[in-house]
Amino acid sequence: MKKKNGIWRIPVLIVIFCVYFSPFYILTVISFKSATDLSSRWEFPAAPTLDNFRTAIEQGGILKALFHSFVIMVIAVLLIVVVGSLAAYPLARNKSKWNKVIKAFVMGIMMVPPLSILVSLYSIIVDMGGVNQYWGIIIILLTFELPQAIFLYSNFISSIPTALDEAAALDGCGPVRTFFLIIFPQLKSVTASVVILAGIHCWNDYQFSLYVLQSSEMSTVTLAISSFFSQTTSNLNAASAAALLAILPVVVCFLCLQKYFIKGMVDSAVK
Amino acid sequence: MKKRNRVMNLFYIPALILFSIFVIYPLCKGIALSFTNWNGYSQTYKMVGLSNYTRMLTDKNVIRAFINTLIYGGMSTLLQNVLGLALALFLNQKFKGRAVTRTLVYLPVMIAPLIMGYVMYFFFSFNNGALNDLLAVFGKEAVDWLSDGKTAVAILTIVNSLQFVGISMVIYLAGLQGIADMYYEAADIDGATPLKKFRYVMLPLLQPAVTSSVTINLIGGLKLFDIIMALTSGGPGYDSHSLSTLVHRTYFASENAGYASAIGIITFLLIAVFSNLIVQYLKKKEVEM
């Protein structure tokens, strides 16, 4: 009785498909077109060329930028996991008045928009000598990704029975050993969420990197792409080849680990 | 046990140190700088009292950016939630191809907004722009999309919304899947029409999802920076600046760090007050349900 035919879905699907597929299509087409080919951006190149990729790698330094982004992301995410889960443990377990204040404070940090303190944050990093250094950008990304990690971890740890901690304490484990040997191994699934959310943010960061990494030698992917676009307005094809190379790792990762990406998103949004 | 707790509390010290040095200290320093005429690099600067703040009240660019920020925040949130819920309802049905469609809609969330901005440039540019090519197929004149401030703001809002609508979609999908069938069955027995079921059964039960989704979209929209930098750089003129991009411009291009700090502090207060009010309101609604 409730079976209706689904024909009406087809036009809706076509619209969704066109809107969401076209950016990737256009980017690909432009990347494979030679700079002198002025045909419509919808037309696939008659003679696809790899020259743009060569330019992007040789002149745009996109491979080096990918490397910088990768190093920054890996170290930052590692620190976020360690510092974040450590901080979340007492906040989830030891619910004294004081710790409630700390937790509210951490959640409040999440509300501070980076832009409102960028000017003074930048001058502090300059004073500390962190400009154009890996540690300068890593420490800032770490700080601003921490509140979300602490939030996710403390929610998750609250759901682990305290009997585990008590048993460990009876066996003579101090808090440090209890955390690393008993609690941390339980955190695999929430760690996957934290790694994915923080990883994507670090990889895609532009605002902080723009301030901290000013030397072109230290460019991350987003910085390399933006300087590529502003310098080579005459060669947009090479710039889009660079952009394609930059999003490829993310797209491949997402397609392979989709389940975890979506779980991470939902975990972070729903209390 | 008490001593154990005290040792445990040491675990959050590293995080607190980071927050103090890189959030609280800069926030205080930013407040202090906002009362000066510092240019961003010289060793000396003067206190200028409240003049940075009074200057803002009459600065057309700041007022423009302020209104734009509210549009980016408010309109993106509205669009993302309406579209996100519609997509979630559509993709919650069982049919072939829904998994692929979900993936496709969620994919742009992963892409750096900066890169998305540049890709959108290929669509909206006047010469050889993909949209103008489409218009040409229908025999329409080419449009210079980004030459008008209001259109530019609208385009930026739409691009931001479409890129991140996947977040709302996923949150609503999770919400829809959490609603037990018995509620719908009960409504069926009471003879509810599909519209009434949506309004009186589904929406109230989705309220927590609405709160999460609105909060995330609002904070994201009010902070909009990368897409603007990539697509319009705040132009034409100052017409599409958000407060974020304006702070950046005031600091680097106009070398006016004191003034930029003042704009930053005001932005912080605005975002804090605005998003807190909305979250409180939504939370209250959740309790009432």
Image (spheres, rainbow, N blue to C red):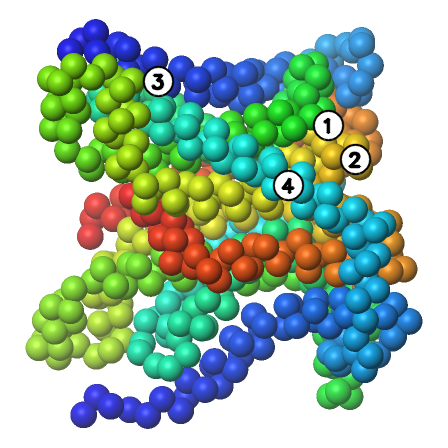
Task: Report the Cα–Cα distance between label 2 and label 3.
Answer: 37 Å
Q: Amino acid at mark 2?
A: Glu
Q: Can see residue B76?
A: no
Mark 2 surroundings within 10 Å by alpha-carbon count, few (fewer than 14), some (14 through 19), many (20 or more): few
Q: Quadrant of residue A123?
A: top right
Secondary structure under tag 1 reads: loop
Q: Amino acid at mark 4?
A: Ser
Q: Position of residue A150 (x, y in %)?
A: 37, 31
Numbered tag placed on residue B11 in the rendering: 3
Side (left or right) of A27 relative to A159? right
Q: Are marks 4 and 3 on the same chain?
A: no
Q: Say which residue appears at 26% left-offset and 70% top-offset.
A: B198
Q: CA distance from mark 4 to mark 3?
A: 29 Å
SS type, badge 3 = helix
Q: Earlier in the sequence, mark 1 or mark 4?
A: 4
Residue A84 visible? The answer is yes
Whole-percent x, y for residue A160 in the image: 19, 35
Q: Mark 1 and mark 2, same subunit?
A: yes
| Label 1 to label 2: alpha-carbon separation | 9 Å
Mark 4 or mark 2: name the one nearer the start of the chain.
4
Callouts 1 and 4 close, C-beta under 8 Å = no
Q: Nearer the viewer, residue A133 or B229?
A: A133
Disc 2: host chain: A
Q: Which mark is residue A217?
A: 2
Chain under label 4?
A
Mark 1 = which residue? A132
For numbered disc 4, what is the local secondary structure?
A: helix
Residue A84 % position (x, y): 40, 29
Q: Which residue is mark 4?
A: A69
Which label was assigned to residue A268?
none
Please name the amino acid that badge 1 sits on: Asn
Q: How far is disc 1 from disc 4 in space, using C-alphas?
A: 13 Å
